[in-house]
Image (cartoon, rainbow, N blue to C red):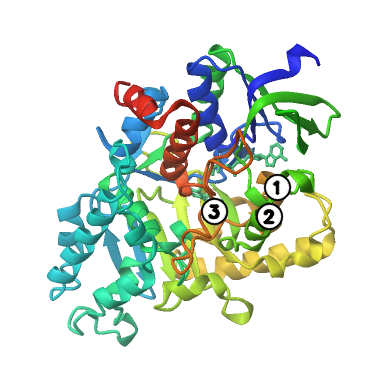
Amino acid sequence: MNEMNHYDVIIIGSGLGGLLCGYILTKEGFKVCIIEKQRQPGGNLQTFTRSGYKFETGVHYTGALGPNQTLSRYWKYFGLIDELPLQQLDQDCFDRIGFDECEFPLAQGFGNFIEQLLPMFPDARSGLTAYIDKIAEVVSAFPLYNLELPVDHREHHYTTQSAYEFLTKLSQIPIPKSKFPNPKCQIPLSAVLAGNNYLYGGSRVTPLHVASLINHSFISGAYRIIGGSDQIAHILVRAIRMQGGTIITNHEVTAIDNVRQKFSIGTTAGDVYFSTRIISDIHPAATLSMMPAEMVRPAYQKRIDSLDNTAASFILYLSFKPGTFPYLNYNYYHHAAADPWAESGITGSQWPGMFLLSTACHKKEQEFAETATILTYMHYDEVARWKDTVTGKRGAAYLDFKHEKAEKLLRLVSQRFPAINAAISHMDISTPLTYRDYTGIPEGSLYGIQKNYHEPLLTTVMPKTKIPNFYFTGQNTNLHGVLGVTIGAVVTCGEILGLEHLLKKIKNG
Ligand SMILES: Cc1cc2nc3c(=O)[nH]c(=O)nc-3n(C[C@H](O)[C@H](O)[C@H](O)COP(=O)(O)OP(=O)(O)OC[C@H]3O[C@@H](n4cnc5c(N)ncnc54)[C@H](O)[C@@H]3O)c2cc1C
C-alpha cells in the first residue's frame, strides 16, 4: 500500500459540510484528504463568472450571523467570521413577500418582526406573538443551536409536527378590507408567514422544526456575504492545507470498498486512496450506490433509496447594464396565488407559481445591482428527457426549452419589476439537470432529502452509520443551509472526537 495515499480520514465532496469537517479534523491532528469531483471546491458555495460578473450558485443570504448569534459563534472557531465581509439586510425587511399588488415585510428582531406586520394585520398581535414564541420554543429544544450539548430528546416533539398545519391553525386572520381595498389582497397571515418557504422547499410534509430553525435564524440576523460565498470555501481550503490537509479536486469518487477494516476509494482518474474512516458529504443514495452490496445492510439500502428529495429549481442569472437596476437590500418573494405550500408542485400553464429575486452585494452602500438571481421551482420530470446528456451538449431542443421557460419566468418577474427586461445585459439559465451534474444531487434537488413529519426518523439520516467508521455529513444529515450544515459538521465530527470535547473547543474560539 502506498503510504502517500493513506489517510486517517477521507472526505468525499468538498461542499460546506466536507470542508468544515476537514477543518475540524485537521485542526485536531488527523491526516485528512478531501476528494472533490469539480475543479473548484465548495459545492453550493461555488460561484461562476460571466462577462466579468460573479454569480452565487447556492448561498444568497444566511441567518444568525449577527454579533454573538449562533452562526457567528460557530464560524468564529472556523476562522470565518473575522475574514468574511458581511452586509446586513434591511432591519425592517430582509424578505419582502408579494402577492399581486400587496407586499409584506419580514423584519429582523423578534419584536420588530411583529411591529412591521401589525399595520397590515392590526388584529394579529396575539397570532404574531404566538408565532414568534413557538419558533423560539422549537429552537430551545435543539441545544446545538445555542452551542450546548443535547441532553434529552425534546426535539422529537417538533420533528413530528407539520409546519404547514402549525401556520394554518395559528392564524387565518385576513387583512382588514380597509388596508388593501383590492379583493386580491385579502391574504391570510399564515400565507405571509409561509411566504419565504422556498428557503426549505416548503412542502406540506415539512416538519415544524425545519421551518422554525430556519426562520428563527433569519429573524435573528440576515446577512449577505459581500463579494460572494466562494470566499467561505477559499478561507477553509487555505486553513485545511495550512493544517496539513490534502484537497484533491477534479477527481470524482466512483467506488468505495472496505477490506480488513481499511477503506479504499477509487476515482475516475484511476487512482486509489485508503483510509481508516470515511465521511461522505454527498447524497446518501449516491454514496451507497458506490459500495459493493455486501457492505450495506439491505434494509438500510432500501430505506435510503426510498427517500424523496426536496423540489428542484429553475434559475436565471442576470447581469445588468450599469446603473439600471437598483440593488435591493432584501430578497423579494413573489407568489402568483395565496398558497405558498402548493408552489413546488406547479407545472404546465400555471408555472411558475412563484419567484425569488435576490440581488448580489458587491460592496457596502451599493446603489445599483450588477447582478441578480431569480429562482423558482421546477419539476425534474420537465427535463428528464435530457437526463442522459451532459452540460453544454444537451442539444437544441433543450436550449429552446430553457429559453421558453426563461421568457415565461421573466414575464412574471416584469409584472412586479417592469424595468427589468431593459436592464438585462446578459442572462444565464440553470435547470434541475445543471444542479444534478454540478453537485451530484439526485434529480437536481434544492436541499437534498425531504424531511417528513409523518416519518421523522425514517427521513433523517444519522451521521454515524452501521458501517463501522463510515459517517455522513452535509445537508442530508442535520439540516440544509449554511447554518444547518455547519451544525451538522460539528455533530459528524463529534461522533469521532466526542461532541462535548469539540463543543468546548468551539465555544472557546
Ligand atoms: C439554488 C440554491 C440556493 C440556496 N440558497 C441558500 C441560501 O441562500 N442560504 C443558505 O443558507 N443555503 C442555501 N442553499 C442551501 C445550501 O447551499 C446547501 O444546503 C449547502 O451548501 C450544502 O452543503 P453540503 O456540504 O451538503 O454539500 P454540497 O454543496 O451539495 O456539496 C457536495 C460536494 O460533493 C461533490 N461531489 C458530489 N459527488 C461526488 C463524487 N462522486 N466524488 C467527489 N465529489 C463529489 C460535489 O461536486 C460538491 O462539491 C441553497 C441551495 C441551492 C441549491
User: Who comes first in sequence, dot 3 or dot 1?
Assistant: 1
Q: Which residue is mark 3?
A: 447
The spot of residue 472 in percent (x, y) is 57, 41
The spot of residue 66 in percent (x, y) is 28, 37
Say which of 311 and 355 sits in front: 311
The yes-or-no answer for disc 2 within 8 Å of ligand 1 is no
Mark 3 packing: few (<14 Cα in 10 Å), some, or many (20+)?
many
Instruction: Quarter of the image for the C terminus: give it.
Output: top left
Mark 2 packing: few (<14 Cα in 10 Å), some, or many (20+)?
some
Instruction: Label 2, secondary structure: give it.
Output: helix
Q: Which residue is mark 2?
A: 301
Ligand 1: which quarter? top right
- Could you tell whether 224 is left or right of 449 in the image? left
Residue found 86% across the figure and 29% down from its top: 270
- Could you tell whether 273 is left or right of 365 in the image? right
Instruction: Label 1, secondary structure: give it.
Output: loop
Q: CA distance from mark 3 to mark 2?
A: 20 Å
The yes-or-no answer for disc 3 within 8 Å of ligand 1 is yes
Name above or below for residue 105 compared with residue 441. Answer: below
Q: Nearer the viewer, mark 3 or mark 2?
A: 2
What residue occupies the far bottom of the structure in this picture?
183
